[in-house]
Amino acid sequence: MSGRRTELAGLAAELVALKKRTGLSLGALADRTSASKSAWHRYLTGRNLPPRETVAEFCALADEPPAHLMALWEVAETECSGRQRGGDGAERGTDVPETRRPPQQAADEETDRTPLTPLTPLTLPTPPTSLMPAVPATGASRTARAPERSGASSSTAPGSSAVAPRRWRHWHHWRRIGKRWWPVGLSALLSTVVLTAVPLVRGPAEPAPAPPGCRGTACDGENSESQGCTEPGSAFGAVAQASLPGGARMEIRHSEHCDAFWARVWLGQVGDRIELRVPGRPTRHAVIRDRHDAEGYVYTLMTGGEPTAAQACLLPVDGGPEQCFGT
């Protein structure tokens, strides 16, 4: 049991270390990821294995390359899957999926043996003459039909109906009207469908970012993550960047949401130091402390205002010359 807990505990320890570096509380993690506050408590204490998507969300939130944490997650998930296959699915960190019972074959066989009832031909009723307005006939058509009416009246028995030809004339009249106007009705129907479907295709509007924890000079010496300066939907990004000798890369990043800027480095060496310098303002610095920092991002605290005349420098651990660039 201790060997199985070691992998899950190792993943939890890395998540706790990443949480400390970002300065986020459990409530802040719950607000910015898909997991709840109580779920994060279980993940960080090693009681449960977090979903892969939650680990990926945390890495993106902390600007952390996901390769290392995903590798730890794969090992921990393999251990948990091994416990589930061994019948230990009720242990901590695993879930036993609920199985569904197959459909009853007897019911299917009974359905197959049920004879099909033949369909009865549908007979359309003749439209009532009382609901259709009479169509006045022109002089020519009235003259042409006069012999027919005389012949019909002379050959029809006194008790028979003489309105059948007139009924069919009304029916053909309404058919002509339907053929003339059905394109208009179809166009109106298609327009309604399109207007209804457009909001569904566009999807819900992206919610506005929450107000930042600081703005301008109030952000001096504050952490960009904990103050909400990199919230999804807010305007932030690199205003200057450089690829330095030795493979390290650096950026000066600015947040319009917080009106503040900071520097970050990745792919550096353990022991390298970065500095953010602005004339007349305090120098911000950060150090790559271990291999996890070297594989991820290390960033300085913020300086409020616009990044005018800002300069970022890398001081190599081997004592080489500092490498600087600016806005």
Image: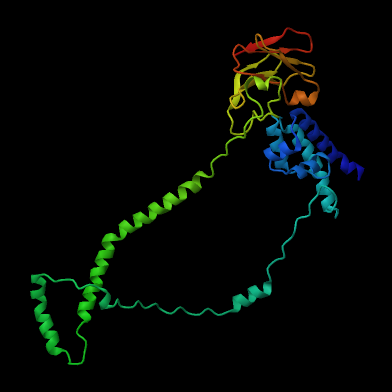
Work out whether residue 203 or residue 267 is closer to the camera in this orientation and state it.
203
Residue plotted at (78% across, 39% down): 73
- The x, y position of residue 160, in whole percent, is 21, 90
Looking at the image, is 5 positioned above or below residue 170?
Answer: above
Find residue 236 and report its image quarter.
Answer: top right
- Left or right: where does residue 149 sit relative to residue 13? left
- The x, y position of residue 18, in whole percent, is 77, 31
Q: What residue occupies the far top of the structure in this picture?
A: 321
Work out whether residue 152 or residue 13 is closer to the camera in this orientation and state it.
13
Residue plotted at (27% across, 68% down): 175
- The x, y position of residue 174, in whole percent, is 26, 69
Q: What residue occupies the far front of the structure in this picture?
A: 218
- Left or right: where does residue 133 sit relative to residue 306? left
- Left or right: where does residue 55 sit relative to residue 306? right
Work out whether residue 44 or residue 177 is closer to the camera in this orientation and state it.
44
Find residue 138 and report its image quarter.
Answer: bottom left
Q: What residue occupies the far bottom of the structure in this picture?
A: 158
Find residue 49 and report its image quarter.
Answer: top right
- The x, y position of residue 242, in whole percent, is 63, 16
Label count reads 0
- Quarter of the image that includes the C terminus: top right
Looking at the image, is 89 positioned above or below residue 61?
Answer: below
Residue plotted at (69% across, 10% down): 323
The colour scheme used here is rainbow
